[in-house]
Image (spheres, rainbow, N blue to C red):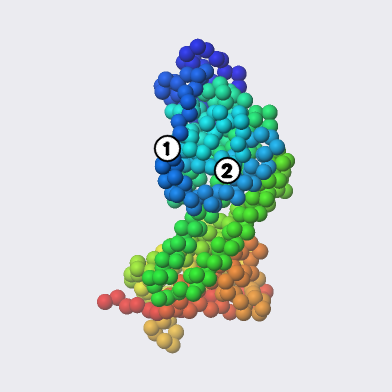
Amino acid sequence: MGQKIGNNGKNDIPARGSFLESSIEESWERCIEYGLNRLNRPKALKVSNRKLEQLLDEYKDLLSTAYPYIKSLAQALSRNGSTVGLASDEGVLLKVKDKVNGLMDLGYQRGFVHSELYMGTNAVGMCIETESPVVIWGEEHFYKGLWDWVGFAAPIKIDNRLRAVIFAMVPIEFAFRELLEIISMAAYSMDKQLELTYDKEKLLYMYTTTQNGRKDILEASSIVSHEVKNSLTNISAYIQLLQLEKGIAITNSNRILNEISRVSRLLDDFRLLSKHDYDNTHLHSLKEIIQLVKDVMMSKARLSNVDIICDPFMEDIYIKADKNSLQQVFINLIDNAIDAMKDGGTLTIGLRTESNPDMAVISFKDTGTGISPEQLQNIFKIYETTKETGTGLGLHICQTIVRFYGGTIEVDSIPGRGSTFTVRLPRAYRI
């Protein structure tokens, strides 16, 4: 880096411009304020055995999730004398894969604290301070003992709160900056997998406290867990290839992005069900809900050259439901309709009552490609999809929510001419 080494360090902070560079400068300033000496690092602090046991128990689920990633990264980097691990949100190392002599003496062992106060400017400590991915290159470390190394770290967050840090220490002669992207992707995948785990726990709680939708909830939970694990396994494999290539090849990076995108779609569909509030049912205007979802989807419709038309509603019709969940059901149906009209078209939304005045009927009629008779038979089955990038969960979850309110959802379709999804829900009346 070429920064000057002085006697007291007060003028040694390198000039930076980017966010990461300014963060390094701020870290150096904090180290100086702490009274740290770059040439003589104090003995690394280690927590007590009792404290470490408590942390290991607290982080056991996260450690279990992180282990395949740490193992894959360590295998790819092992020939270079590197180490990979996981730290708590306070900087305590909970897992260090592959003991490296030069690093063990510097405190890269389980139980040692890697905050700035004890380690100076380092990847784990700065990642905790910034809650962002960081790379500390050679002489950017505050302590001279780390100048032969490059530190990489990325935050693992749950519900947008920092929970842990995954890190790697690589000899400077073998380091490549693309490794930060790889570690960041691993952290992102762990974020999603942990969110899924907690959502599944919520669903299991609903299973034990509600009488409706139990079978569908558990079936969805099982399938989603299986599919997410498959995607994350593929991501880990591609990460190893990238490690060995010392860079990100376009083909492999696209594969990773596709897998991550697939995981995100799975989780989005799954969280629609897990966030459904069974207790938050109130009287709502279907006319208002339909207008709201139309406004939400207009941007995508315009980009896809699709017109959304609402048939004139003769009267307002009310429903007793969780408004947010019902909106998501309608948004899902509109989104599917737009995707079915690749060359543009028209989506017509209707609201009416039929022979039974106590049932509200909401229809979504598109002019898309239609659905084949074979696909139509299985359209609402879990893990069935007519879309190349579909998850097979969206319509199944929509049906589960509609059924919860005593309703039905059906589809009629003519290949080449379009499809009509019809939702029927018990009507509620204002008193």
Residue 146 position (above or below residue 87): above
The residue depicted at 43 percent of the width and 36 percent of the height is: 47
Q: Is mark 2 on a helix, strand or loop?
A: helix
Residue 406: which quarter of the image?
bottom left
Give the camera-side residue of 292 and 219.
219
Residue 388: which quarter of the image?
bottom right
Residue 389 point in image, percent of width and height: 63, 61
Q: Give me the C-alpha separation between circle 2 and circle 1.
A: 30 Å
The residue depicted at 68 percent of the width and 42 percent of the height is: 76
Give the camera-side residue of 413 and 139.
139
Whether residue 89 is visible here, answered yes or no, is no
Say the numbered circle drawn on residue 184. 2
Q: Which of the two labelled residues, at mark 2 and mark 1, occupies the earlier sequence position?
A: 1
Say the numbered circle drawn on residue 93. none
Residue placed furthest toward the left: 431
Residue 150 point in image, percent of width and height: 60, 30
The residue identified by callout 1 is 48
Q: Quadrant of the C terminus?
A: bottom left
Image position of 206 (left or right of 334): left
Residue 235 position (above or below residue 201): above
Residue 34 point in image, percent of width and height: 41, 23
Q: How crowded is mark 2: few (under 14 residues within 10 Å), some or many (20 or more)?
A: many
Residue 58 point in image, percent of width and height: 43, 49
Q: Which amino acid does label 1 sit on?
A: Ser
Give the camera-side residue of 79 and 431.
79
The residue depicted at 55 percent of the width and 49 percent of the height is: 66
Q: What residue type is labelled 2?
A: Ser
Whether residue 141 is visible here, answered yes or no, is yes
Q: In which quarter of the image is the N terminus?
A: top right
Total residue callouts = 2
Q: Residues within 10 Å of mark 1 (few under 14, many from 20)?
A: few
